[in-house]
Amino acid sequence: MKTVSARCLILACGNTLREDDGVGPFLAAWAEERFGGEPALRVISRQQWTPELAEDLAGAKSVVFIDCAANAEPGSVQVSRVEPGNGTSGLATHHFGAAELLSLTRELYGKSPHTSLLLTIGASSLELREGFSEAVQSALPEAFRVLETTVCDLLNSPNYRK
């Protein structure tokens, strides 16, 4: 298998029909527009993370996972490092998280991105409707700023230049 190389991969997940859960795909679309044409950046948005994404991760030097966080303060914006989980045996793909995906990537390809970050936005509502709660809507400017700064730092890092 030939992996596609990217200096920075944005990997977002969420369901746009479940209110705040759609913030991941929304930020991914914003990043595609903001960084459009940047050859070192790839953006992938899915309803959920699945094992097939391991191939994309294997070709990335860095990754920014984006998701909502139901267990965080509504509207909070946080970036944290992600390390590979403790293995992939017995994983149910419905709950496949960033750490498990990194672990699978390492298991299958013998490597994973050098830098792996998780950007989360605290969800207030996961009801069946489109749009965002007031808390997430208010947090979007901060989320844009944090995502832009994070991606620019990764793209301009001397560790990741070709």
Image (cartoon, rainbow, N blue to C red):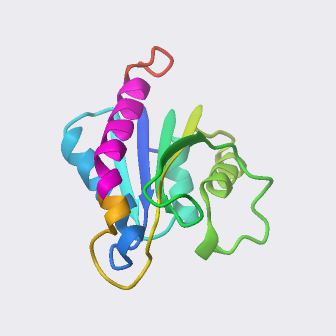
Residue 133 on image: x %, y %: 34, 69
Q: Name which quarter of the figure residue 156 lies in.
A: top left
User: What's the magenta region?
Assistant: 138-155
**Could you tell me what secondary structure mostly forms the magenta stretch?**
helix
Residue at 47% x, 61% y: name it. 74
Residue at left 33%, top 73%?
16
Asked if residue 151 is among those painted magenta in the image, a careful observer would answer yes
Residue 161 is left or right of residue 130, and the answer is right
Q: Quadrant of the image for the C terminus? A: top left
| Residue 137 lies in quadrant | bottom left
Q: Position of residue 2 (x, y in %)?
A: 49, 46
The stretch drawn in magenta includes residue 154: yes
Relative side of 26 to 91, left or right: left
Residue at 44 percent across and 77 percent down: it is 126
What residue is shown at x 72% (from left), y 70% (from top)?
91
Residue 73 appears anywhere in the view: yes
Q: Nearer the viewer, residue 63 or 134?
A: 134
Which residue reaches farthest top?
158
Near-viewer residue (95 or 67): 67
Name of the residue lying farthest toward the bottom: 128
The reply to whether residue 1 is in sight is: no
Is residue 73 placed above or below 14 in the rendered structure?
Answer: above
Q: Is residue 61 above or below residue 136?
A: above
Residue 21 higher or lower than 110, as above or below = below
